Image (cartoon, rainbow, N blue to C red):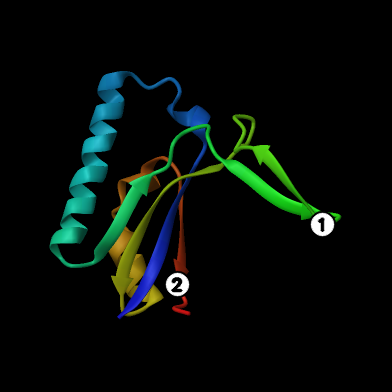
Amino acid sequence: MAKFLLLARDIPQDFAELSPEEMQKIIEKYVAWGERLAANGKRLDSNKLQDGTGRILSRANGKLAVMDGPFSETKEVIGGYWILEADSYDEMQELVADCPHLEHGRLEIRQIEEV
């Protein structure tokens, strides 16, 4: 069975005006969805990424350049990830079709190439 990385892409400003109660309801949907995948043996790992923190690295002229990021001005950020097992991209699409994230953002599916 193949492993897939599922990335949650969203626009941070879309969540800025939600009340704590609205956020709690959204979180409960994510938890229930993730627990169902885990119970079916499909979810291997998942985590939410911290908002507004991180580093962007590049190399120029042989020197490492480090910038803070992602920035709040960024339209879309990766807010979290899941590692899932499935037989194919088609099965992945079926597994994530009811992911609560699709109510607020986009999902990216990438197969992990074991090296």
Which residue carries the number 1 mark? 62
Q: Residue furthest front?
A: 63
Left or right relative to 29: residue 14:
right
Residue 4 at x, y percent in the picture: 39, 68
Left or right relative to 111: residue 85:
left
Task: Establish if 95 lies above or below 48.
Answer: below
Identify which amino acid the numbered label 2 is placed on: Gln
Q: Residue at x 60, y 42 (%)?
A: 55
Task: Establish if 32 lies above or below 25.
Answer: below
Element at label 2? strand
Report the Cα–Cα distance between label 2 and label 1. 32 Å
Residues packed near mark 1 inside 10 Å, few (<14), some (14 to 19) or many (20 plus): few
Q: Residue furthest right?
A: 61
Ranked by sequence position, the earlier of labels 2 and 1 is: 1
Asked whether the beta carbons under mark 2 and mark 1 sit within 8 Å of each other, the answer is no
As drawn, the label of residue 100 is: none
Q: How many marks?
A: 2
Q: Residue at x 32, y 59 (%)?
A: 97
Q: Residue at x 27, y 36 (%)?
A: 27
Residue 79 at x, y percent in the picture: 45, 43
Q: Answer with the quarter of the image where residue 66 lies.
A: top right
Residues packed near mark 2 inside 10 Å, few (<14), some (14 to 19) or many (20 plus): some
Which residue carries the number 2 mark? 111
Residue 52 at x, y percent in the picture: 52, 32
Which label sits in the foreground, 2 or 1?
A: 1
Q: Nearer the viewer, residue 38 or 94?
A: 38
Identify which amino acid the numbered label 1 is placed on: Gly
Task: Establish if 98 lies above or below 56.
Answer: below
